[in-house]
Image (cartoon, grey):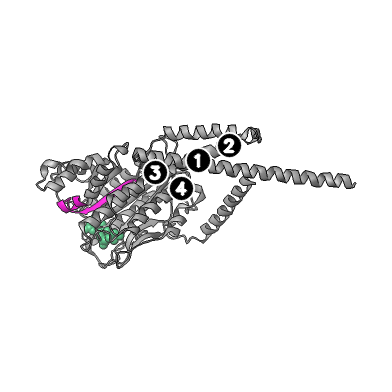
Amino acid sequence: CYFNNISHVFILSLVTFSKNLNMIEIRHHTFGQPIIILEFDDSQEVIIYNDKLDSIFNHPEIQDRKVVILSLIGAFRGGKSFFLDYCLRFLYAHFPSINNPNKVTSFIFKKDDTWMGEPDEPLTGFSWRSGTKRDTTGIIMWNDVFLHTLDRTGEKIAIFVMDTQGLFDNESTPADNSRIFALGNLISSIQLLNLMNRAQEDHFQYLQFATEFAKFAGSSMIEKPFQNLTFLIRDWNNDDEYSYGTAGGNKYIKEVLSPNNCNNQELQSVRETIFECFNKIECCLLPYPGKIVASRKNYDGRWSEMNEEFRSELKTFIEFLLMPDNLIIKQINSIDVNVKDMSQYLKNFFTIFQSTEVPRTSSIYEFTVESHMNSLVKKCVNDYKMTVYRNSDLITKESMPIIHEKCKEKALVLYSHEKKMGSSEHDEKFRTELIDEIDKFYEYFNEQSEQKSKEIEAELMVQHAAIVRE
Ligand code: GDP
Ligand code: MG
């Protein structure tokens, strides 16, 4: 009955899901739309749209897939949405997606230019170039999800694309910027920082929070707290010294981030610790796209009007970034995160930004630990439940306590072997929570079995009564 109910719910959600599919408007080259999942209103209050987040993350097809989240953050009108829309073109040309009815079945790299679309095709996707005045400030997610199975490991992944709008501007303080930047890092696995012309002193203030977080997390993080950070520098005009693309970019960023190149004490410490916070720091230098892209009012995004040098570098970089071998699975404390857990992480991280005006490093760290440990406890409780169910044929009133103890022991061994986060107090707290959860389930299971045997007894009595009547 328990399993029947589950499969019933599952089938129901599949039906609803396929109904939704039919309703999705199929637009030129796109099968999704941008959805605001977190918004800062005029008084800087944070509004979280959990229902929208759920509508993207709750597809039954993707729950157990590992997560890849591409995010781009940076100042307003820096060509971020424009760049992401070309990323969407690459993704649609190479990967199947939840909403794409003409599914590309597997990844075959299109070496030619075809993934970039027709030369005169207007650019759609995340809304770009919506004027000089920013309207929405927040985090926007593409509501279609790309699917792939990694050749190297056979793992199934789900790729999400996230845009940010108006988060860094003249009105926001450096402290705000660095927190928003940290939020981007916490929730994405491929984080791009979009900068105009060059990386300068005030941009490193964004990184301050990340380095603070790393110090706070200290030894409780097994690996570096953040994954990749890629500086994407637009309108680069010093290609004599550092060539376009990632080769020149990586050389450049190494120079710029070197602590020797800095007079400011505070920023020097950022430079010193930055390499300890991120698994990998990279940089790509893109050329000026040409006058039409940069300033023509009614330019519609078509690539035929880009400077050829820019088009070619844009193409090369997107191919590099999104090639399956380079996709990075979201990890927290070096554990891969799946879609199911990711939506919970997102909600948790967003909540701290909502509950305190200026979230402190300690509370963000605490949330990371809580989220990580909660999902570990859930995993171990599920392990216990599955072993109990697997043994259900052997269960009698007498054997139940012994089976319970064995399964509990197995779940606790699993808990002790898994990577944990936080202090020994955290460890103790979550271990106790795990034992409580298991004991609670045991009580419930006992009640159920007792109920079941009562039902059987009642049924036998009815049958017995019927026989007596005859
Ligand atoms: P966002 O606010 O950062 O998302 O910027 P948009 O993607 O909306 O683009 C803002 C403007 O920048 C548009 O007019 C684009 O045509 C233009 N643009 C796109 N890429 C570049 C670039 O690399 N350099 C410059 N100078 N402008 C660009
Ligand atoms: Mg934008």
Tell me the amino acid under the disc marked 3: His
The front one of 315 and 119 is: 315
Mark nearer the N terminus (2 vs 3): 3
Q: Position of residue 99 (x, y in %)?
A: 47, 54
Between the C-alphas of marks 3 and 4, the distance is: 13 Å
Near-viewer residue (80 or 240): 80
Identify the element where label 1 is drawn. Answer: helix
Q: CA distance from mark 1 to mark 4?
A: 16 Å
Q: Nearer the viewer, mark 3 or mark 4?
A: 3
Q: Dot 4: within a 10 Å radius of its alpha carbon, few (fewer than 14), some, or many (20 or more) residues?
A: many
Inspect the magenta stretch and tell me whether residue 190 lies in it.
yes
Residue extending furthest toward the right: 470
Disc 1 vs disc 4: Cβ atoms closer than 8 Å? no
Q: Quadrant of ligand 1?
A: bottom left
Q: Is mark 2 within 8 Å of ligand 2?
A: no
Q: CA distance from mark 4 to mark 2?
A: 23 Å
Residue closer to the observer: 253 or 27: 253
Q: Secondary structure at mark 3?
A: helix
Q: Nearer the observer, disc 1 or disc 4?
A: 1
> What residue does disc 1 label?
381
Name the residue carrying label 3: 372
Residue 388 numbered mark, or none: 2
Q: Position of residue 233 (x, y in %)?
A: 21, 50
Instruction: Specify start and end residues of the magenta stretch as a single range.
Output: 189-205
What is the quadrant of residue 44 in the picture? bottom left
- Looking at the image, which is closer to me, 465 or 92? 465
Relative to 383, 352 lies left or right: left
What residue sits 43% from the left and 58% below the top?
A: 50
Q: Residues within 10 Å of mark 3 (few under 14, many from 20)?
A: many
Q: Which mark is residue 340?
A: 4
**What is the three-letter code of the residue carrying label 1?**
Val
